[in-house]
Structure formats: C-alpha cells, structure tokens
C-alpha cells in the first residue's frame, strides 16, 4: 500500500484522515532546527526521508511552505515527473488527491 509523506508531524493537526490513502504517515520536516539559519540540514534530512518515496506514494501538503517547496524540489531533482499530493478540503473536512504532472 502507499505511504504518505507529511511535511510536518501531527502537532496541532490530526493527520489520521490521510490514512484513507495509505498505511503509514512519515514526517519529513523537523522544526527543531530554525529554517532561517540554514536550509542545508533540512534538505539533507528531507532527501534522506524521501529516499523511499515511490510513484504510488503521496506527499501530504500541510505545514511550512518552505518545507513543501523543498520536498517538491527534491522529488523533481530525483526525476519524478508526476507526484500525488493530498490536500485538505475545509468544506468536506477530508483530504483529497491532487496529481501534479510536469
């Protein structure tokens, strides 16, 4: 089954609704290091955590926009031309898939 790569950990958000699309949520963005000090540690950490990302997996779009952008850049650099995202819909109170193809 697919894995879901979340830009942030659960924190104040309950991400469990995303499990409708996969069997595991993997947090890939660590907020313990201030992002404004240097993006290098984040890029290295995200690159490592996204190393197992497969075409059937999802990127859960929640959290810091810098982290979202970095994750997209890392996947593009790794050669992904198509990425499946999960986006929260406030009206439906659920996640829905969005496919980005470049």
Image (spheres, grey):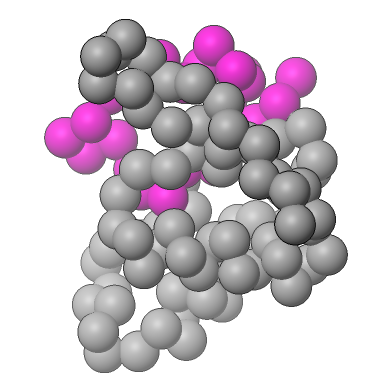
24 within the magenta span: yes
Relative horizontal placement of residue 36, taking residue 54 as reference (left or right): left
Residue ID at (43%, 32%): 87
Residue 69 shows in this picture: yes
**Residue 68 on image: x %, y %:** 44, 58
Q: Is residue 11 magenta?
A: yes
Q: Determine whether 92 is above or below 82 in the image.
A: above
Q: Residue at x 35, y 89 (%)?
A: 38
- In this rendering, does residue 25 appear at all? no
* 78 versus 102 height, above or below: below
Q: Position of residue 10 (x, y in %)?
A: 29, 35
As displayed, is residue 12 above or below residue 78?
Answer: above
Q: Which residues are magenta?
A: 1-26
Closer to the camera in the image, 4 or 90 = 90
Tell me where residue 90 appears, x and y as whole percent: 25, 21
Does residue 83 appear left or right of residue 59 in this picture? right
Q: Is residue 65 left or right of residue 13?
A: right
Q: Quadrant of the C terminus?
A: bottom right
Q: Residue at x 37, y 14 (%)?
A: 94
Q: Quadrant of the N terminus?
A: top right
Is 77 displayed left or right of 18 in the figure? right
User: Which residue is rendered at x = 48% and y = 53% of the image?
Assistant: 28
Specify the quadrant of the image occupied by residue 20.
Answer: top right
Among all residues in the image, which is located at the extreme left? 12
Q: Considering depth in this image, is 22 or 94 the residue closer to the camera?
A: 94
Number of labelled discs? 0
């Amino acid at each position: 089954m697919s894995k879901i790569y979340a830009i942030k950990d659960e924190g104040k958000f309950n991400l469990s609704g995303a499990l409708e699309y996969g069997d595991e949520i993997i947090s890939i963005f660590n907020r313990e290091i201030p992002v404004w000090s240097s993006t290098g540690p984040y890029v290295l950490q995200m690159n490592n955590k996204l190393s197992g990302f497969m075409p059937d997996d999802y990127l859960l779009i929640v959290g810091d926009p810098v982290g979202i952008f970095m994750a997209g850049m890392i996947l593009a650099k790794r050669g992904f031309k198509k990425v499946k995202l999960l986006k929260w819909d406030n009206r439906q109170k659920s996640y829905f898939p969005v496919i980005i193809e470049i």
